Amino acid sequence: MAKLKHKLRIIPLGGIEEIGKNMTAIEYGNDIIVIDCGSMFPKEDLYGIDLVIPDVTYLEKNIEKVRAFVITHGHEDHIGAIPYIFQKINAPIYCTKLTQALIENKLKEYNMPNKIKINCISAKDVARIGCFAIEFIKTNHSIAGAVALAITTPVGTIVHTGDFKVDYTPVDGDVIDLAAFSRLGEEGVLLLMSDSTNAEREGFTMSESKVGECFEKYFDEGSDHRIIVATFASNIHRIQQIVDCAEKHGRKICFLGRSMENVSKIAADLGELNVNPKSIISPDKAESMPKDKVVIITTGSQGEPMSGLARLATGEHSKLKLKKGDMVIVSASAIPGNERMVYRVINNLYRLGVIVIYEALETVHVSGHACQEELKLILSLTKPKYFMPVHGEYRHLMQHALLAEKIGIESRNIFMPELGKALEIDKKDAKLVSGIPSGMVMVDGLGIGDIGSVVLRDRKVLSQDGLMVVCITLSSSDGCLLTEPDIISRGFIYMKDNEELIKEAKQVVQEIVEDIKISRIHDWSFIKNEIKHELRDFLYAKTKRTPMILPMIIEI
């Protein structure tokens, strides 16, 4: 057996201990392939941040090795970072046709069309990239075109499931290729990396077709209602079932929301969504249609403030108004962190007299991720030597690791991934090693990575305790105050109701300036720091609040 020159390295750069920004680099020698390139919505403590993407410092340092990005499917947590990261790292992309179309649409929005080479592949294809051979395996998920990856390396075969479920009755009739997983297991799998999102849930994930049965029930019962369904724009199979019910019941279809309109058109053009173009109507036309002759398919299942459903719920949509007796079906579960926004929209819908159907009441949503029995099935079929759970918070990863032990994988061969650590494998053993730059990069407007902890801390202070601006005018000759200090409060106190406090604060500032020795009159930094410290102590003693204090000095 030839001696290996290098160790195989599996480097998680995102999607570990979090739901979102999925990215993993696979490295051997002079070759790196990157699996997925996702983004994540910011958590509540990331004030004003629009998006979070992976830190790709390691890839930038090794940019000459990066051969390709392989994308498992077209969800934002797997493709959302492409417009940002590909400004620095431009490598070919390999993905299925719907994923390609979604990426191309995204690149057009960012004025980056034709700048990236995208290779369209299909399930069962094999791509040879550097020292790797990558086989694409058909899986089921909540978006068409999802694939798992079997990556042949000089050390052995890695199987990466991507996001998946085992659906025996999928909407498109194309079931997961379990035979491929079985064949790989017989041939020998070095490492399995598997989706952990539903590792806490027992049993099997319900088939997507169950949602269609529920839709059918409400379309049958809803002949006296206008029907509005909110779901993810990317869930083409869900949309297909809504379209099928609408056409069966003689209803026209209105797609509402920019992403819903774009994705449905893309899917229809690709043949992934079968809808009669004559059935589609505009929002203007939908508003005037008889209530039993239209269904509205909209964005907003996560309660996003500017989405179609959120604007309908507050009566702010410019073209459509909800009426008492309308039926709204929220066909999605709340992504962790979005619960308050989702329930706010549902509450607003109820206030309008609307009939609301959502996951807590009916089977109007099923997950796209595998539960425990499906996870055990993949573990049993592939029989990996090593196992690494991926795609989930730490609790999900831990539960998946415990499942692997039950299947018979030795605990010493199960590796809990960590950002900042790489799994190194050779013919003899495997181990986690530190030293990989990792973390998150924050996108704020046009800025990518220019917002750090100091700015976030300031935003937090502003959001909690507000701001006080102190403006003083000094004489350039002797440092004396030429006018009374001017104080402006924003988000701290209402000045008209706190005139006495403002008066006392001005007195504190005046005393600070008068106490500063003549030798320091031109040392603006010293004067500002004194005002900040003294005024902060005064305000805390009076209000138990610590606003951000911003001194301004004018010298005449």
Image (spheres, rainbow, N blue to C red):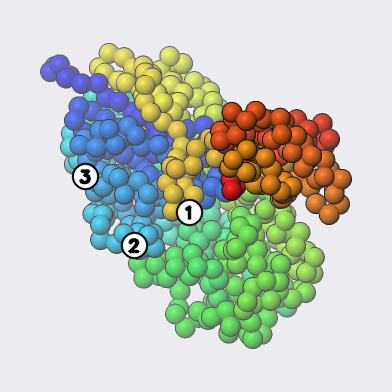
Q: Quadrant of residue 353?
A: bottom right
**Mark 3 burial class by Cα count in 10 Å: few <14, some 14-19, many 20+:** some
Q: Residue furthest left?
A: 2
Q: Give whichever of discs 1 and 3 has the lower sequence position.
A: 3
Spatial CA distance of label 1 from label 2 is: 15 Å
Residue placed at 80% from the left, 51% from the top? 495
Residue 102: x and y in percent read 38, 59
Q: Which residue is mark 3?
A: 127
Residue placed at 78% from the left, 64% from the top? 350
Q: Is residue 35 left or right of residue 205?
A: left
Residue 515: x and y in percent read 71, 30
Secondary structure at numbered mark 2: loop
Residue 92: x and y in percent read 24, 48
Residue type at the position of mark 2? Asn
Q: Which residue is mark 1?
A: 445
Camera-side residue of 52 and 395: 52
Q: Which residue is mark 2?
A: 111
Spatial CA distance of label 1 from label 3 is: 37 Å
Residue type at the position of mark 3? Ala
**Mark 1 burial class by Cα count in 10 Å: few <14, some 14-19, many 20+:** few
Residue placed at 15% from the left, 16% from the top? 3
**Mark 2 burial class by Cα count in 10 Å: few <14, some 14-19, many 20+:** few
Residue type at the position of mark 1? Gly
Are dots 2 and 3 in contact, CB under 8 Å?
Answer: no
